[in-house]
Image: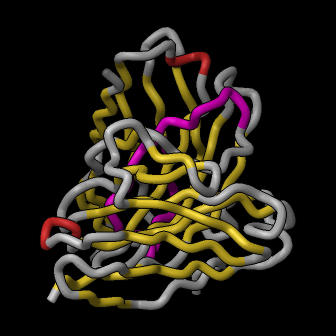
Amino acid sequence: EVQLLESGGGLAQPGGSLRLSCAASGFSFDTYAMTWVRQAPGKGLQWVSTLSGSGDTAIYADSVEGRFTISRDNSRSTLYLQMNNLRAEDTAIYFCAKVPISEVVTHYFPSWGQGALVTVSS
Amino acid sequence: QSVLTQPPSVSAAPGQRVTISCSGSSSNIGKNLVSWYQQFPGTAPKLLIYDNRERVSGIPDRFSGSRSGTAATLAITGVQTGDEADYYCGSWDTNLYASVFGGGTKLTVL
């Protein structure tokens, strides 16, 4: 059974940084791309970033490009999201999700973690 | 502002059929596959439909998906109170080179 467990959420000040982690189990982690999707309070889903299974291709939403960095440690089956220069509008629940293939171009996300809350406020 | 457009809400009486629309463009739904997700308050989204009409294992056949041109539809027949949730469509956008979602539709079962 696929399991994804996010951690690292919390309160950060505007301009500050946080790093989210997503521990994966139940599948061959390095075979699949992984993604981050966020949901602001009371709002819809917003795709943030996707990283290929090998870790050599990353894509980002325009709203986070240059501020967020997605990475992975395949030896630890863990996905990361380094968030710098945080803004109030980054406040959201951040979900990690498994992609059904190893490349970043994907039409769906079959498995999701429970999410980690990030609050950006002074 | 979401790339894919969904109605904010739909409602139906128990046992009725309800449809949720998802409108896109030639760069997303028009040339790429569509997926549908169900989300209950305080929980993670759950994949229901992928590749336009393929149901995930374990999803009742009351749920079905279709696509025509630049629009997709999720249909739920025999709606139940337990189906009350938010529903999101998703796809890939070739021009944006990004995954995209609709704004979500809240289903109320009256």
* Outermost residue to the top: A75
* Magenta stretch holds residue A50: no
Number of labelled discs?
0
Residue A52 spot, x, y in % from top left = 68, 31
Image quarter of residue B9 = bottom left
> Visible in this render: residue A88?
no
Residue A89 spot, x, y in % from top left = 44, 78
Image quarter of residue B23 = bottom right
Q: Choose between B102 and B61: the one closer to the eye.
A: B61
Vertical comparison of A67 with A88: above or below: above
Say which residue appears at 62% left-offset and 70% top-offset. Answer: A63
Say which residue appears at 58% left-offset and 81% top-offset. Answer: B2
* Magenta stretch holds residue A101: yes
Image quarter of residue A43 = bottom left
Q: Is residue A48 left or right of residue A96?
A: right
| Magenta residue span | A81-103
Say which residue appears at 31% left-offset and 21% top-offset. Answer: A1
What color scheme is it? secondary structure
> Visible in this render: residue A76?
yes
Q: Choose between B83 and B60: the one closer to the eye.
A: B60
Q: Choose between B8 and A4: the one closer to the eye.
A: B8
Residue A40 spot, x, y in % from top left = 36, 73
Vertical comparison of A12 with A18: above or below: below
Q: Choose between A41 and A14: the one closer to the eye.
A: A41
Residue A86 spot, x, y in % from top left = 46, 66
Say which residue appears at 42% left-offset and 50% top-offset. Answer: B47
